[in-house]
Image (spheres, rainbow, N blue to C red):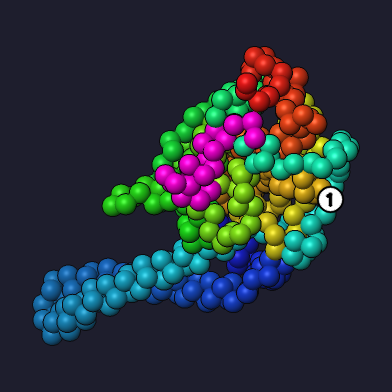
Amino acid sequence: MLDPKLMREKPKEVKESLKKRGLSAELVDEWTKLDSRLRDLRQEGDELRHERNIISQKINEYKKLGDEKSARDAIKKAQELPDNIKKIDAEIIETELKLNEIALNLPNLVDKSVPVGDSSKNKVLKVFGKPKKIINAKGHEELLTALDQIDIERAAKVSGARFYYLKRDLVKLNYAIINFAIDFLRKKGFVLIQPPYMLKKEALEGAMPFAAFGEMIYKIENEDLYLIGTAEHALNAYYLNEILNAKDLPIRFAGISPCFRKEAGSHGKDTKGIFRTHQFDKIEQFVFCRPEDSWKEFELILENSKEMLKQLDIPFRFVVLASQDMGRVPTKTVDFEGYFPSQKDYRELGSCSNCLDYQARRSKIRYDDKNERRFVHTLNNTAIATERMLACLVENHQQKDGSIKVPKALWKYTGFKEIKKKK
């Protein structure tokens, strides 16, 4: 949610940001009109209440003076005021609801450093590592099926498309990646959190415009609960409607959870294997901090991703997303993309986003700063999305004989150094 003061004082800036996202700026004009009307209504309501108080005083004065006629006229006028006040109050409530609805659906401002345009304007910031020359590189599904490490067909039979059974050593490798990320972030001082896997709508709306993300997550029938699409939303909700102590900031969380997504609108795209699925595991970095520290925290959590990917010996790159390719919540997003030998291309493994005070305003999360209450800034970063990471790792560490080498950083978690065909 944007700062109402910004909306009032700099509507052009908000409109320009919407245009960068390829969205209509009409909502800003509608919000401005409603905001002006709301202030008029409140003033009108205050004036009517003031008038009611004055009339009450006059009625008492007329009665003391024995002026019955003036008292009757004043009483008649006083009797009309409650209905008028009631109408004003009803319109105030209606106008506030409309204003809030618009505010909840407006996206965050686009940072000045973000390229303007669609995905073709995404900018590669830096490339790390050189892709290995693998002759006739196989895709992860082919490799893992041949090694009897996954079963997509049986998963489809019992659950539908985009589900999977992980098997044998791949299960161990999956948890090795999770434990590797957990230990890495714990040593960096992040607080480990395993959040609820279901959230109320209020909690979800605190993290993002529900209309934009709601179609991607699963609703629990007959309950005000939704399966989480990412631990980010649950971590943001941890301090819902709370006042934090400035001395405790920054607060850095590492959320460990499964994620559930419908992946609506992505039919026919990455449907093979475990790259794009309805269910996956993820370790999420999430930060609450002072506004003046948010870009420093952005660099910190991005650096964490770089260190982890380097230890997993995967070629990757950082890409800043263009204004029309990033989500509505961040002011800036940097994706980290891993190289997939079978596709001879880089694909998204995760992203790092600064959301400024956008989520904090929606969730009413503030902190005390010298007797002044200010909204915190929030940031999030996919430390590891394990199924995508498995797919990328497997392809990059495939061997001529079809076996898969395990990166040294994971040996202590797996207990083995390679995955090969069981005899």
Q: Quadrant of residue 81?
A: bottom left
Residue at the (71%, 18%) spot, across then down: 417
Q: Is residue 189 left or right of residue 315?
A: left
Q: Amino acid at mark 1?
A: Val
**Figure quadrant of residue 245:** top right
Give the magenta range.
146-166
Relative to 2, 131 lies left or right: right
- Give the position of the C terminus as an image quadrant: top right
Instruction: Please give the residue where the numbered disc 1 appears in the rendered image.
Output: 124
Residue 296: give x, y in percent of width and height: 75, 37
Residue 285 percent coordinates (x, y): 62, 35
Find numbered disc 1 in the image and state the secondary structure of the residue it sits on. Answer: strand
Q: As displayed, is residue 129 above or below residue 104?
A: above
Work out whether residue 50 or residue 350 is closer to the camera in this orientation and state it: 350
Q: Residue at x 70, y 59 (%)?
A: 325
Q: Quadrant where the N terminus lies?
A: bottom right
Residue 132 in view: yes
Q: Nearer the viewer, residue 225 or 72?
A: 225
